[in-house]
Image (spheres, rainbow, N blue to C red):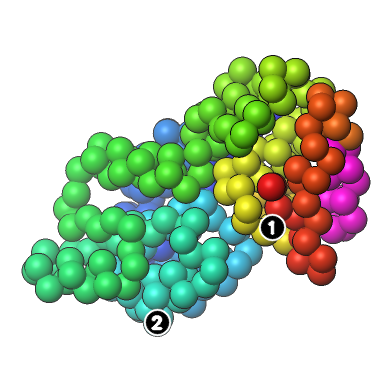
Amino acid sequence: MSPARAHILVVEDEAAQREILRYNLEAEGYSVAEAADGDEALLLLEEEAPDLVLLDWMLPGVSGIEICRRIKRRASGRDLPVIMLSARSEEVDRVRGLETGADDYMVKPFSLRELMARVRLQLRRARPGTMGARLQYGALLLEPEAHRASWAGHGLKLGPLEFRLLSTLMEHPGRVWSRESLLRRVWGREHDHDTRTVDVHVARLRKALRRAGAPADLVRTIRSEGYALG
Ligand code: CA
């Protein structure tokens, strides 16, 4: 099992546009969820826990602007890149787009090649592990493509789930992950596991870290909240 593929939510009311975006994103190796209006988008943001959102400006129901504001108001909004797509090119729209907290902005019709480049750029920033980037935290090193992790040069013996768990924690050191969000990230969106499953695998990860000489409190338990690295 490789590190999880990045999951992208496409919010667009025109079916033909959605289809083109899905096709191109899947060709790049991402998994894709689609919403056709604002209300569906808000629902899928919770259910799908996407790694990036492509968000059409003009939507029936809740507007793209409002959805973007709601995403960015949340604590986790910083780590969820939003690329706004708009049919209007007036400069005022660009400014408003940035005021909503959108990470990037493209005017239709746009080049799909350029859009894919910007998607990669945003994901490398927000979810480096899913893009194959090496992650480092102190003496801890994780190389997704080689499927290797080590502490001060001592290899860690990790199962695939512990590897994904460590990759997720290392993407944002210090960030507190709830057990539920770890389940979605590590076990996938259609998991049917109990949150205690997370505790079992965190215990295995800690054991592997201790064996390689890492400090016992490297993966911390945050009471009634979840886990964090460092
Ligand atoms: Ca539209």
**Residue 193: percent from left, percent from top:** 85, 54
Res 116 quadrant in image? top left
Secondary structure of residue under mark 1: loop
Q: Position of residue 205 (x, y in %)?
A: 82, 37
Q: Position of residue 111 (x, y in %)?
A: 20, 43
Boundaries of the magenta span: 191-206
Q: Horizontal placement of 86 versus 162: left or right?
A: left
- Circle 2 packing at 10 Å, graded few (<14), some (14-19), many (20+), is few
Q: Amino acid at mark 1?
A: Trp
Q: CA distance from mark 2 to mark 1?
A: 31 Å
Q: Assign the N terminus to one quadrant of the image.
A: top right
Give residue 61's mark.
2
Relative vertical location of residue 4 with respect to residue 33 in this rendering, above or below: above
Identify which amino acid the numbered label 2 is placed on.
Answer: Gly
Name the residue rendered at 81%, 69% in the picture.
224
Please name which of the two marks, 2 or 1, marks the residue nearer to the observer.
1
Q: Is residue 87 magenta?
A: no
Residue farthest toward the bottom in the current orientation of the protein = 61
**Residue at the image position 42 percent from the left and 33 percent from the top:** 27
In the rendered image of this protein, does residue 157 appear above or below residue 53? above
Q: Secondary structure at mark 2?
A: loop
Specify whether 207 is left or right of 60. right
Residue underneath mark 1: 177
How crowded is the residue under tag 1: few (<14 C-alpha within 10 Å), some, or many (20+)? many
Q: Look at 9% across and 68% down and name the residue there.
A: 91
